[in-house]
Amino acid sequence: MKSWSVCLLIPVLVLAAGCRRVADQPVDTSQLPLAVGGVVPGPLAVTHGGVGSPPEWSTMTQEAADGAMAQLVATDDALEGALAGTVVMENNPVFNAGTGANIRLDGKTIQMDAALMTSEGDFAAVAVIERVKNPILVARKVLDTPHRMLAGEGATRFAHVLGFADIVPTCPEAEAKFHKRWQRLLDGVAGGGYDHFDWRRAWNFPGPLPEDAARDGGPAGPETGDTVGTVTRAVDGTFAVTLSTGGTSITLDGRVGDVPIYGCGSYAGPAGAVACTGHGEEIIRQMQARTVYNLMAGGLSAQEAVARAAAAFPPEWSVGLIAVDAHGWGVAANRQMAYGVASR
Ligand code: GLY
């Protein structure tokens, strides 16, 4: 099994400078902190640990890619591989998904989104699901229903009826991130376009505002990454993508990001598969995954397409993308991002 890490950077095409916010026009990709890719035949799996995740996490994203590849080889099924890769990251408290999912501003609530898509056009998602360890596996079960998405309490009850354990997936890492987040809010540097929003006036959680939440802040280690994702290509040339997230760092109760929204966080079709991570509201506005897919369907390689989209994203917001096509793979981000690649 071959693998790559962030240490092995393959230069990207440097495209002509152009309009910053239109991904279907050439943009300057040479300044991106991360833009790599390669040409690889056969089964292929690429993972990301969320934009913002430090390169040191690449051993864990590589573990996820290897887990995806093991399933790809065992099943020859692109979706089975993509599910396996994202489950590995949902089970690791370092990542903002499943076990390590962000705690919302009330200090108690954990609401997660997850989605999957295949190149045959199958799509399924869960939104604002609570009290499960592996939201992506619940999304897989939604695929067996007549529906495409379950949300909120219905999604949570659906999971528990099917036998998923009723657990609050929290951990010391998520607690530390929560306290650090509140400190940033109190300091007035929420970031990500949220600095000027009055959270107190809009407070919609059932419980009171946790005024003393920053009290136990302390060192919280590196800031969390965002959504985790896996894209795969099976030996028969079919593709799949899975995404899972604890949501963006600072949100109101019930907020839904890009992950479960069709064509936004993820997309797959005959030309390949795409997974996004980053500022969900802007990813939705750009219908980012479908936009990148269209670039690949129009003839750009996976590497070219993700680099162009990352370079065109508004620089004040973070974005990361991974993609596979018939020939190879691409990874690009406008911040740091851990990723893994596995083939055989
Ligand atoms: N990209 C994840 C989210 O915005 O929820």
Image (tube, rainbow, N blue to C red):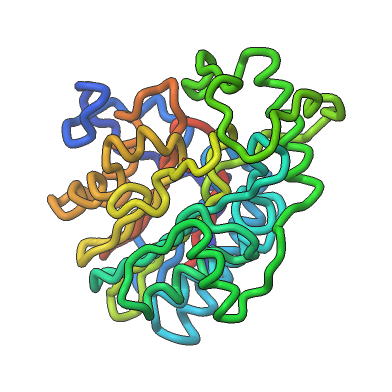
Instruction: State whether residue 126 appears in this view.
Output: yes
Residue 240 in the image: x percent, y percent?
Answer: 36, 67
Is 265 located above or below residue 212 in the figure? below
Q: How many marks?
A: 0
User: Observer-nearest residue: 108 or 239?
Assistant: 108
Question: Which residue reaches farthest left?
Answer: 298
The quadrant of the picture occupied by the N terminus is bottom right
Is 338 located above or below residue 205 in the figure? below
Residue 53 in the image: x percent, y percent?
Answer: 60, 41
Left or right, residue 104 beside residue 41: right
User: Observer-nearest residue: 236 or 191?
Assistant: 191
Left or right, residue 107 beside residue 264: right
Residue 123 in the image: x percent, y percent?
Answer: 32, 66
Q: Quadrant of residue 191?
A: top right
User: Observer-nearest residue: 242 or 99?
Assistant: 99
Residue 288 in the image: x percent, y percent?
Answer: 30, 42
Q: Residue at x 63, y 49 (%)?
A: 110
Q: Residue at x 79, y 25 (%)?
A: 214
Q: Residue at x 21, y 29 (%)?
A: 22
Instruction: State whether residue 243 appears in this view.
Output: no
